[in-house]
Amino acid sequence: MQLCLAECGGFARYLKGMALCMGILLGMPSILSADQGTTVRWEGYYLPAAELGPENPLPMFRGPREDETIRLDPAIPLEERRYLGWRVAWRCLPYRIQDGYNRKKQLRCFDALVLENETLRAVFLPNLGGRLVSLIHKPTQRELLARNPVFQPANLALRNAWFSGGIEWNTTLRGHYYLTCSPVFAAQVRGRQGEPVLRLYEWDRVRCFPWQIDFHLPPGSSVLFAHVRILNPHEVEIPMYWWTNIAVPERKDVRVLVPTETGLTHSYERGELTIARLPHYEGRDMTYTTQSQRAYDFFARIPDGQRRWIAALDGQGRGLFEVSTDQLRGRKIFAWGMSQGGRRWQEFLAQPGFAYLEIQAGLAQTQMECIPMPPKTAWAWTEAFGLLEVEPKLVHGPDWTAAWKAADACLEKILPRAEMAQWHQKFTQISTRAPERLLQMGSGWAALERRRCQAQNLPDPLPEHLPFPPESLGPEQAPWLALLEKGVLPPVEPTITDPGALMTQCEWAPLLEKSAQTADGNHWLTWWHLGNIRMEALDLEGAEKAWQASLACQKSGWALRNLAVLADRRGDRQKACQLLLQAWHTGPQIAPLAIEYLQMLTQSRRFAEVYDFVATLPEKIRQHERVQLLWARAAIELGRLEGVEKIFHYEFATIQEGEVSLTDLWFAWHEKRLAAAENVPIDEKLRQRVRRQFPPPRQIDFRMFVPAEK
């Protein structure tokens, strides 16, 4: 066992890091330890990287519903429908949106933890959600994952910022996890043979539970094991979600194999979730992702009793496999599609020439559902990742059943199902073993929760084997710790551009209410936070009273903005616009507030006010890409086309998955331009003409589905 610590600093370290960087970028293995067996160590991981930037200080409240309605094919059996749409509606708080990134990349050193034995080398980034960014099969020097050559956040996660490549770990709610671009705890645990085990873990703030992943790479093992354990510490049932997302290289010769004959996918013709039979559906072979023009997902219907796995194998029959114990039920294929928009997304998330597909594994059959987790329950499962080699003629032959059964047989030889069950039992025993050393701190929220429970004589919700030390408490937790220990939330001036970390856990509401009854605690910030908790609990009247009380203490743009959100929720956009304008004039005058006001005006079709308000903004805010997008929309609607064309040459950073605002602007601009030049009306004939004659440039085309021309 060996632990090597390498710091990112100094000229010598820089030179060493540059050499490592070249190895990473060129796909060459780094220098290995001379010792045999399993090691874990720190290394510098160098990438051209954009800065993540500041968080958005405005609270983004969830919608009025916890469930979603999903259109379903009547042929889907009742037992498969039971939880579809259950508890999957978007929510983010108390986490804040991460939308401060751009697309300016510089070479940057990330702290990486490397777990390695004689066969595999696994590289994790604990400051980015514990992402497994590289898994190298050393005998063949083959990278098994799609390793992104850059770090470029984009708007795809629950908190906005997300990056592609490698293997990510998603829990709590449908989507890319809240901490995918944030630090998590890392620790070293002693394995059964004395080898190091890498443990990543954290406390989830949305549904308030701890999770952990123990990565095992026993000496001589040809597979990397991930033993996942999640705990419901509450006296009530909670909705639970888990999906492991694995990016692998996408090429024409890569076929995805999964042990099933049918699955669930979205029918574009019928607009519903429907049953599809593999491999062909709607004129394409879904197991070769490059055969589809459209983006798609496919959720496998693996029959009971069948071992659960998925693999992506190339023309030589080689590639990555993932297999798990039966608790992890679901498997999924995701592809961006081969349309111009799909290819644009691929390069937008990385660079030209980089393409990946995703194979995924989850607790439920689909990602459109959570499943109920009983109170005081721990769930655990084990996944394994490694190189699979299958006879290529069988893999790529015309007989789909023969193809996946051949892979199933080869997998059984590499890692027999009975042996996998034995490993799982061994890992389960180690999963509650205390770490030998803490490698990295995560957030201080778990330590704060433990402190709250101690102060209120409540059971500790955190297991002893997951250390959340008091030293993890930091500036974000400081005001809440003061509220807990002194009974008063510290005040700040409302003109501050960041009022601090948010709290929406209902147990803090009585503490805030008591603070508001004291001379020192009866201030605008106490009532503002209390309103946030009530709003997130869907107590709209209680939230309104709290924010009005906040204004009575001291006028702030923070309370006015939240009242505007409430007015919009109640359907009064005119009032919402008035309140947002008041919030802007009251301050602080920050870009997120200006953007929300412009969005509200746009939704109300008050384009002249959008156009005029943008002209009054400070230069830095006026040049924000979201402000420019809203200005261009207003300019086109008003027929003021001068200067609009420049928008189509800008490199936007925060375009959201599924967003088509840029192509919509492109078509609207041409329609207005031609209508004015030729003195013709903007009707369906002109719209179809524009779409034929003026296809959007690749740079602005993020359409994942392009309707057929009429």
Image (spheres, rainbow, N blue to C red):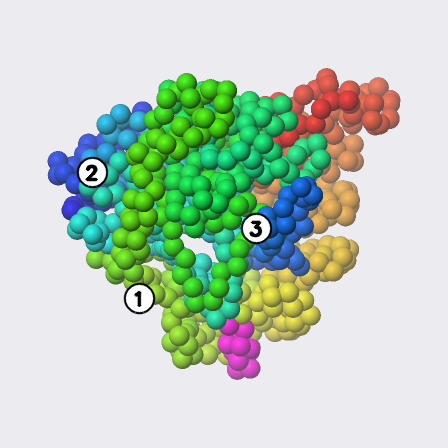
Q: Quadrant of residue 656?
A: top right
- Sequence-wise, which precedes: disc 3 or disc 2? 2
Ranked by sequence position, the earlier of labels 2 and 1 is 2
Visible residue check, residue 409: yes
Q: Which residue is mark 1?
A: 464
| Mark 2 burial class by Cα count in 10 Å: few <14, some 14-19, many 20+ | few
Magenta-tinted stretch: 507-518
Q: CA distance from mark 2 to mark 1?
A: 31 Å
Q: Amino acid at mark 1?
A: Glu
Q: Residue at x 39, y 47 (%)?
A: 325
Q: Is residue 454 above or below residue 79?
A: below
Judged from the image, the secondary structure of the residue bearing numbered disc 2 is loop
Circle on res. 369: 3
Residue picked out by circle 2:
220
In the rendering, at what x and y percent does residue 623 appear? Answer: 59, 39
Residue contact between numbered discs 3 and 2, judged by CB atoms under 8 Å: no
User: In the figure, 114 relative to 701: above or below?
Assistant: below
